[in-house]
Image: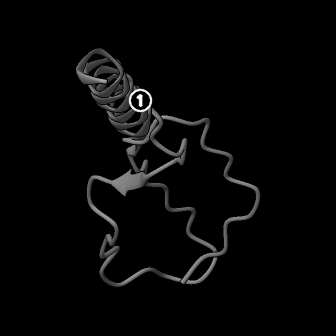
Amino acid sequence: MKCLKGILCQCLVLMLWVALTQAAGEKEAIPVIEVERPTYDFHQVTQGEVVKHDFRVFNRGNAPLEIKNVKPG
């Protein structure tokens, strides 16, 4: 009877260990967008003048980041 309790206890500990290691290793894959400077002031612009600015965008997540639509503010 002591042997059976020992085996059951070891199995329980092993199952708990497996469950905890799997839960810790399974993080949801999500993209996380980060814009270095999200706003930029062009100051005064005359009509018809072409202005340009590059925004640095980073993906800090662990899944591909897809930018499907961009609108000026």
Residue at the far front in the pictured view = 1
Name the residue at 38% across, 44% down: 56
Name the residue at 30% across, 76% down: 41
Image spot of residue 8 (x, y percent): 37, 27
Of 39 and 41, nearer the camera is 39
Residue that badge 1 annotates: 15
Residue 43: name its quadrant.
bottom left
The answer to whether 32 is drawn above or below residue 17 in the figure is below
The answer to whether 27 is drawn above or below residue 17 in the figure is below
Image spot of residue 66 (x, y percent): 68, 46
Image spot of residue 38 (x, y percent): 34, 67
Q: Give, as a three-letter code, the residue at label 1.
A: Met
Name the residue at 31% across, 24% down: 1
Of 73 and 1, nearer the camera is 1
For the C terminus, the quadrant is bottom right
Disc 1 crowd rating (10 Å Cα; few below 14, some 14-19, many 20+) is few
Of 53 and 22, nearer the camera is 22
Of 43 and 60, nearer the camera is 60
Answer left or right for 20 relative to 53. left
Image spot of residue 16 (x, y percent): 34, 35
Answer left or right for 73 relative to 59. right
Name the residue at 36% across, 54% down: 34
